[in-house]
Amino acid sequence: MLRIIHGENRALLSVSLNSDDSLIAVSSLGPEIKILSYPYDLPELESVELPESKSENEPIESGVVSTAVSNASYETDTSVDEGDLTEAEKKPLTREQLQVYMTEPVKTESNRHQGLQEKLNQMLKQSAPCDVMDRMQQLALMVLDLKPGDLAAYHALIKTGALKGDFNLVYLAAQASAKAKLDTRVYDYQKENDVVAFMTSWREEVFNPVHHRGKSKARLRIKDCEGNENTLNIPDAALHVRLPEELLERLTRIPKIIEFRDFSGISDEEYRNRIFHETERVLSGASPYTSSRLPLQQTDQVPSLETGIMVLDLKAAKVWKDRGRSEFQLRHGEKNWQTFISDEDGMAVMRLPQGKYYLKVGAYLEKTFFLEKDAEMKLSIR
C-alpha cells in the first residue's frame, strides 16, 4: 500500500512513523529518504449490520455482502482516478521493475544420482558382468549424465566396453578416469586403491602407444561372455588421437558437456571425426547438451576431416619431465591452445586435422608448421 501511495517502483527497505503518527519516513533501494503525510483520506470499508443467523447450519453471507458494499464504495469514491489506471496499462513495467516483485528461486541439488550410484554399486559387486552387461552400461552412462567425475561409472564402462570389443569408448573412459574420483561413501564393491590401479593399467599399459610402435603390435586377449578367448587389436584412433587436458578437465567437471553415447559402437574414422568436432566445440566455450538432446546414432556421420600425422620427439627438450613425459601445447590456426603429455619415451605420435599449427614447449614457441593431408611431419625439439 505504501509503495502505491508513494509511487515507488522499487522495494521499500524501512518505514518509520513520528510520535503523533502524522508523518511517515520511507527509504527504498535508492540513496534518498522521503517523508509523506499519513493518508487518512483513504476509502474504507463501510460496516454493515447483518441480521443474526437463525440457525448455525445456515450459510453466513457476510463476506459476500461486505465485498459488494466495498466495491460499491470504491465505484462511487472520487479519490480513485481512472485515468491513472489507463495510463498504467499503457506503460507496462520494465524487467527491472518486475524483478522487485520476483523472489529468488531456491536452488536444490537433486539426489537422483545417489539412487543410480547405489544400483551401479550392486551391479559391480556381481562376479558375472555378462548377465547385466547392457544394463550396467546404461546405468553408468546415466550416472555420468549427472556426475561426470564418477570413477566407478568409468570403471563400469571399461568392463562392459571391453566385453563388447568397443575399445574407442573404453579409451575415452580410461582417459577421463584420470580426472575422476571414487565416492567411497557410496561405493564399496572394491577397494579404492584396486579400482585406481585397474584404471591406471588401462591407460599406461593397454593404451600405451610405446607398446605399439614399430613392428611390435600388441594385442589383447579377452574372454567373451561365452568363455571364448578373442585376440583383439587396439584401434588406431585410440592410439593416435589424443585428448587434450582441457577437454578432460571439462568433461569430468561439467555434466553433459559431451555425450558419451555418441562414441559407442562406431567406426574408427567416425570416432576420430566426432572427437575432433567435440573437442573444438567444448574448448570454444559451448554450453552442455540438454537432457532432451538425442544421442547420435551409429549410422550418423559428422563432417569428415582430412588428417595427417605429427611425430614429435621431446627426448632432448630442456623441459621438466615426469618419468620421461613432457608437457607441450598445440594450437590449430586461430583456435585455442591445447595441452598434451608425451609418452614415457619422450615421443608423441598424433593424428591431427590438416592445417597450420603452432607448437609450444615449456614457455617458448618452438615451431610453426603446416600439416598436409596424409602427410607425416617429424619434429625434434632440443
Image: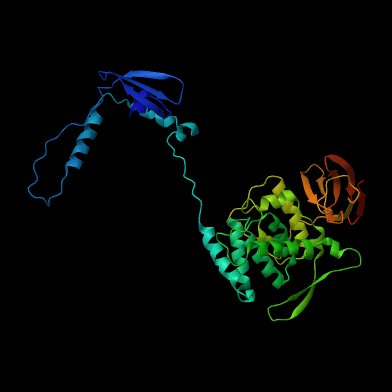
Quadrant for residue 174, please give it.
bottom right
Q: Residue at position x 71%, y 63% from top?
A: 197
Q: Picture coordinates of residue 249 (x, y %)?
A: 69, 50
Q: Is residue 83 shown to the viewer in this render?
A: no
Q: Picture coordinates of residue 136 (x, y %)?
A: 61, 69
Q: Residue at position x 30%, y 26% from top?
A: 80
Residue 191 vertical position relative to residue 10 in the rendered view, above or below: below
User: How many circles with numbers are drawn on the protein?
Assistant: 0
Most foreground residue, 255 or 345: 345
Q: Residue at position x 58%, y 63% from top?
A: 187
Residue 304 shown left or right of residue 25 in the figure: right
* Picture quarter with the N terminus: top left
Residue 48 shown left or right of residue 327 in the figure: left
Q: Is residue 338 shown to the viewer in this render?
A: yes
Q: Picture coordinates of residue 381 (x, y %)?
A: 91, 47
Most foreground residue, 306 or 209: 209
Residue 354 vertical position relative to residue 238 in the rendered view, above or below: above
Residue 366 shown left or right of residue 229 in the figure: right
Q: Picture coordinates of residue 15 (x, y %)?
A: 35, 25
Residue 156 vertical position relative to residue 243 in the rendered view, above or below: below
- Residue farthest along the left direction in this orientation: 54
Name the image colouring: rainbow
Most foreground residue, 102 or 364: 364
Quadrant for residue 188, please give it.
bottom right
